[in-house]
Image: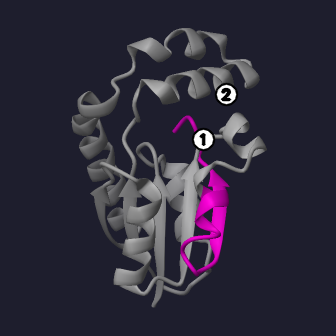
Amino acid sequence: MFTSVLMIEKALTSADVEFVTTLHGEEPVSFHVLLQPRGDQADRLLRALDDVALGELDEAAREGETPEGEEALAPGRQALDVSLRALHAAGSEADGRLVEAHPLDALKALVAETGADEVIVLTDPHYVEEFFHRDWASRARHKVGVPVLKLFSHSKD
């Protein structure tokens, strides 16, 4: 069985689930999901800039309405539960946890703990962070010791 650590920032859509569960053809895959709830207010500016870069001005204007920090934990748990149920429904083994601090440290620890074969980072585009190679996938490549695949999530189901 192939073991993947799947790092996400929101609930998986059905298209996301189909995408990650078919990456390895017929080979069974076990997923260990890490969900990073919305960060603190310092991240809000970067998300707003990404929204503007994508032409989603309405989303940029609503960034202040999205729960941050401690307020994001409950929606994060719900998104993780939805994602795990969807992976199970697709026939995959899956478990998961929320990341409450230092996502890359949590990622490295989980890769070591599970003996993962790869890391899949499935997020929305983050143009500012990607440009400076400060996104999760770019930083993880230097930290986890296994291949890191970066995929963009499907925004709508």
Question: Can you give x and y, in whole percent of width and height, for residue 12 in the image?
Answer: 45, 49
Q: Is residue 148 left or right of residue 27?
A: right
Q: CA distance from mark 1 to mark 2?
A: 9 Å
Circle 1/circle 2 CB separation < 8 Å:
yes
Q: Quadrant of the N terminus?
A: bottom left
| Residue 140 among those drawn in magenta | yes
84 vs 65: above or below:
below
Q: Residue at x 37, y 70 (%)?
A: 32
Question: Can you give x and y, in whole percent of width and height, for residue 86 in the image?
Answer: 37, 57
| Residue 43 among those drawn in magenta | no
Task: Give the SS element for disc 1.
Answer: loop
Mark 1 — residue? Answer: 124
**Quadrant in the picture for residue 55:** top right
Question: Can you give x and y, in whole percent of width and height, for residue 57 in the image?
Answer: 66, 11
Mark 2 — residue? Answer: 50
Q: Nearer the viewer, residue 28 or 2?
A: 2
Q: Is residue 155 visible?
A: yes
77 vs 60: above or below:
below
Q: Residue at x 54, y 71 (%)?
A: 119
Q: The residue under label 2 is which amino acid type?
A: Asp
Specify the segment rendered in magenta.
Answer: 137-157
Question: Can you give x and y, in whole percent of width and height, for residue 146 in the image?
Answer: 59, 80
Q: Nearer the viewer, residue 81 or 22?
A: 81
